[in-house]
Image (tube, rainbow, N blue to C red):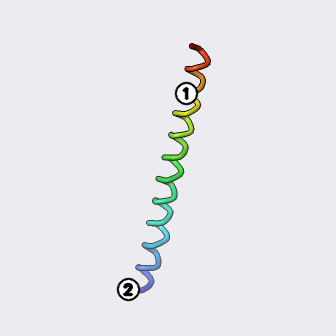
Amino acid sequence: MVQSREKVVPSYSFSLQVRLSTTIYSMINLLQFQVSHNHLL
């Protein structure tokens, strides 16, 4: 019981970390796109 619980927690934190990093990455891409678009205009 305890071992399975210890296994579940790291995987959950890992998925949370991945989700957070992808969100930040997409936000950065969006900002860069807006900046380049403004430069084109």
**Residue placed under numbered mark 2 in the picture:** 1
Q: Nearer the viewer, mark 2 or mark 1?
A: 1
**Crowding at mark 1 (Cα within 10 Å: few <14, some 14-19, many 20+):** few
Q: Amino acid at mark 2?
A: Met
Q: Residue at x 42, y 72 (%)?
A: 8
Residue sitting at 46 percent across and 60 percent down?
A: 16
Tell me the CA gap for discs 2 and 1. Answer: 48 Å
- Answer above or below: position of 14 versus 7: above
Quarter of the image with the N terminus in it: bottom left
Please tell me the numbered disc located at residue 33: 1
Say what amino acid the circle numbered 1 marks. Answer: Phe
- Mark 2 packing: few (<14 Cα in 10 Å), some, or many (20+)? few
Placement of 31 over or under 5, stated as above or below: above
Measured as percent of width and height from the top left, residue 22 is found at 51, 47
Q: Depth check: give the residue in front, 1 or 37.
A: 37
Q: Residue at x 55, y 27 (%)?
A: 33
Assign the C terminus to one quadrant of the image.
top right
Q: Secondary structure at mark 1?
A: helix
The picture places residue 19, in percent across and down from the top left corner, at 47, 53
Residue at the spot x=50%, y=62% of the render? Answer: 14
